[in-house]
Amino acid sequence: MKKLLFLFLYPVLVFSQTSLDTVEELFENKQFEKAEVLISQYLIENPSSLKAIELLGDTYGHQKNWDDAIGAYEKLVKANPGNANYHYKYGGVLGMKALQNKFKAIRFIGDVKASFIKAAQLDPNHLETRWALVELYMQLPGVFGGSKSKSLYYAQELENLSKVDGYLAKGYIYEYDNELELAEKYYKQAIEEGGSLICYDKLTRFYISQNQHEKAISNLYAAYEQHQDKDLLEQIQALEKKQL
């Protein structure tokens, strides 16, 4: 879930053209503390700028300052409750906060689910929210609301929006539930549909997790034939050495 939750941290809005160039450059160079200072200075004179508050929340998130990120995104949700992305980001940082302490996570779970569900309701095309719900419902214990059927429901919504995402989500669900033939089937369908490096990587990692190194190597060769990425050759060499 962590990788998926970090997707919400990338800024999509800016508060001025000048600031855009500066903040984007700082984000690209991972200079989040400097970005935080710049945005904070702007907010002194423009405290109601939702765009600036969102960017500030993003900088907090990149620095794993979850409490301040929660505060920033909560302001956004209250100021504009009809914005799906605000609910998504708020739920995301609540989830990251919960991961810090699993004993205290219980009090966050309800708000995390409510935020993601609200985002999904507000934006029927929000892929990231549906991915978050797929993972959340699979990883939560049943006593806290975990549900494979609900996870599959959002995986189907993903498939309706993007077949590749839907296939990958179903592959993830069935792999998590140890239904390995179905997992392999959907990962292969994702490759057939999209053929991206991400699709190939999901199937490779699946094979490696099952100690099926020959299948992993074969898949990597297929990916290399398609994409000519040198990193794939390094992965092939590493796996072939393990087999010696």
Image (tube, helix red, strand yellow):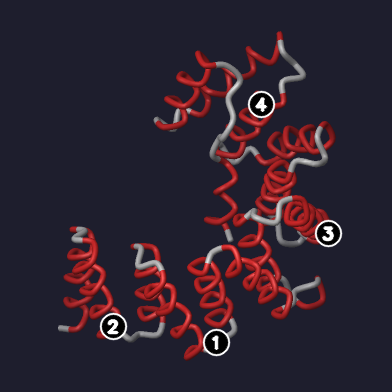
For mark 3, give the secondary structure. Answer: helix
Query: Which quarter of the figure is the C terminus placed in?
Result: bottom left
Q: Which residue is mark 2?
A: 213
Considering every residue shown, the one lying at the far front of the view is: 160
Say which amino acid is labelled 3.
Answer: Gly
Q: Is residue 225 above or below residue 95?
A: below
Residue drawn at x 40%, y 79% is 188
Q: Nearer the viewer, residue 239 or 138?
A: 138
Callout 1 touching callout 2 (CB < 8 Å): no
Q: Which residue is mark 3?
A: 110
- Badge 2, how many Cα within 10 Å: few under 14, some, many 20+? many
Label 3 to label 4: alpha-carbon separation: 27 Å
Name the residue: 57% across, 16% down: 16
**Gap between marks 1 and 4 measured at Cα:** 43 Å
Residue position for label 1: 178
Label 2 vs 3, first from the N-terminus: 3
Q: Nearer the viewer, residue 241 or 78?
A: 78
Q: Which label is found at residue 37?
A: none
Report the front residue among 235 and 229.
229
Q: Quadrant of residue 138?
A: bottom right
Circle 2: residue type: His
